[in-house]
Image (cartoon, helix red, strand yellow):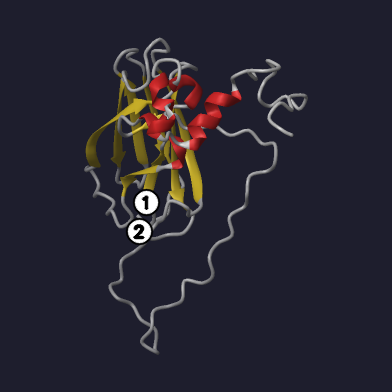
Amino acid sequence: MAKDIEGRLARGSYYQLLKAGTHVPFEGEELSDGSLEMYCADPRDRHAKFQFCTPTRPGSDTQRSDPRDDLETLSLAVDTAARPFIERLTLKTTLDPDGIVHVTARSDLRGDQERKSLHDLQFSVSLGSAKTNAGIADDPGPPLEHQAAEVGSVVVRSNVADKKNNYYVPGELLYTYNSTYFSRALNPPQIQVDERLYYQPCAICRRRANDPKCRCGSR
């Protein structure tokens, strides 16, 4: 495989499912790394949203800020009454001899199971340490340009996590059952503070935080 196969986590993180350089199995075999236990950080809309992607540029030295190409999205039914991180989600990844990656997800409480196949993957052939006549490997060329999302476009936000960490939970939801998390003495992340306040009415005029008529915080 020429690129990593990744799962997109909440807050824009990524989890490596298959590493670049993984060999495609022979006929009659399949490659599986077992099951991965995950969690839903925001079950309010009744679905855990798995997003699978791959770095735009081939190679294994990938940074979080590098652009990604989306492969597929899988939606799994979860218990909307459960708090974040209560319901376990099981994700299994399998690579078959045809170079197709199959992902299967299952929710423990709801018992829902969904399966997707990831096609159009890129592969490479290992030729050892190939060099040019000058003894220097070919230049990979300039970085690829990543097209930014159009202003006003709607995107699906991943709400799954690979570990129990309150940072993955939206601030307005976390405040409903763990208000002490937002104590100034604990220095909570500003993004979660903003999420919580965004849905709170102004203490003076009672308007929404995004209401242009609310100017109570300005001089």
Local secondary structure at mark 1: loop
Q: Please name the residue shown 46% across and 47% down the image.
A: 120
Confirm whether residue 165 shows in the render.
yes
Labels 2 & 1 near each other (Cβ < 8 A): yes
Q: Quadrant of residue 8?
A: top left
Q: Please name the residue shown 45% across and 20% down the image.
A: 175
Q: Please name the residue shown 68% across and 30% down the image.
A: 217
Q: Quadrant of residue 159?
A: top left
Check the picture and name the quadrant holding the N terminus: bottom left
Residue topped by disc 2: 60
Residue topped by disc 1: 4
**Label 2 – label 1 distance at C-alpha:** 7 Å
Disc 2 or 1, which lies upstream in sequence? Answer: 1
Confirm whether residue 167 shows in the render.
no
Query: Where does residue 209 sit, x and y in percent of width and height?
Result: 66, 25
Is residue 151 left or right of 63 when viewed as pictured?
right
Within 10 Å of disc 1 (Cα), the crowding (few <14, some 14-19, many 20+) is many
Q: Is residue 153 above or below residue 20?
A: above
Query: In the image, what residue type sits under mark 2?
Result: Ser
